[in-house]
Amino acid sequence: MDDLRDLYQEVILDHGRNPRNFRQPGDHNRHAEGDNPLCGDRLAVYLRIDDSGIVQDAAFEGHGCAISMASASIMTEMVRGRSEDEARALFDQFHRLVTGTDGDQEEGGVDLDKLVVMSGVREFPVRVKCATLPWHAMTAAMAGRKTATTE
Ligand code: ZN
């Protein structure tokens, strides 16, 4: 678990301990389960998307390491109020961030904001799957699929 020490920045710890939007909304209309067998992270992402394609609510439940929980927590905060296309674009940028293929500066697009705290996982390829699991589940839910796996 030594590799986690450097990742455990304050924000990640905070979200990992007190995940935001950790609930199953009664009025969700999309959901998908995410499974990361390498780490044992399992979570479900719940979305309520209105007729115009805007994410009105995003929440999750499950269990896993602090990285997956923090990433899910931050994700649900960030995608609310965005369109499905914007949420997918955010995932694209986030994926480049955590895989280290984004360069230092993002050109245009959405503000990665709080997601930047997750960039430390790029040093730990196994952890990239933890960080991206909730995003895979979210995009699966948007696509009408019920499951997403990192493997
Ligand atoms: Zn994990």
Image (spheres, rainbow, N blue to C red):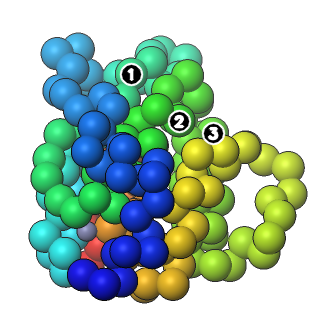
- Residue placed under numbered mark 1 in the picture: 57
Mark found first going from the N terminus, 2 or 1: 1
Name the residue beneath numbered marker 2. Answer: 78
Question: Label 1 amino acid?
Answer: Asp
- Residue type indicated by callout 3: Glu
- Do residues under tags 3 and 1 come within 8 Å of each other at their CB atoms? no
User: Relative to residue 54, is residue 75 depicted above or below?
Assistant: below
**Does the CB distance between marks 2 and 1 fall below 8 Å?**
no
On the rendered structure, is 105 left or right of 33?
Answer: right
Q: Nearer the viewer, residue 21 or 136?
A: 21
Mark 2 element type: helix
The kind of secondary structure element at disc 1 is strand
Give the vertical position of 144 relative to 150 (above or below): above
Q: Looking at the image, is mark 3 or mark 1 earlier in the sequence? A: 1
Residue 26 percent across, percent down from the top left: 17, 15
Is 33 in front, or is 121?
A: 121
Q: Is residue 31 visible?
A: no
Q: In which quarter of the image is the C terminus?
A: bottom left
Task: Tell me the residue at 19%/75% (across/down).
Answer: 39
The disc at residue 1 is none
Q: What residue type is labelled 2?
A: Met
Residue 86, which numbered label? 3
Circle 2 packing at 10 Å, graded few (<14), some (14-19), many (20+), is: some
State the image quarter where residue 49 is shown: top left
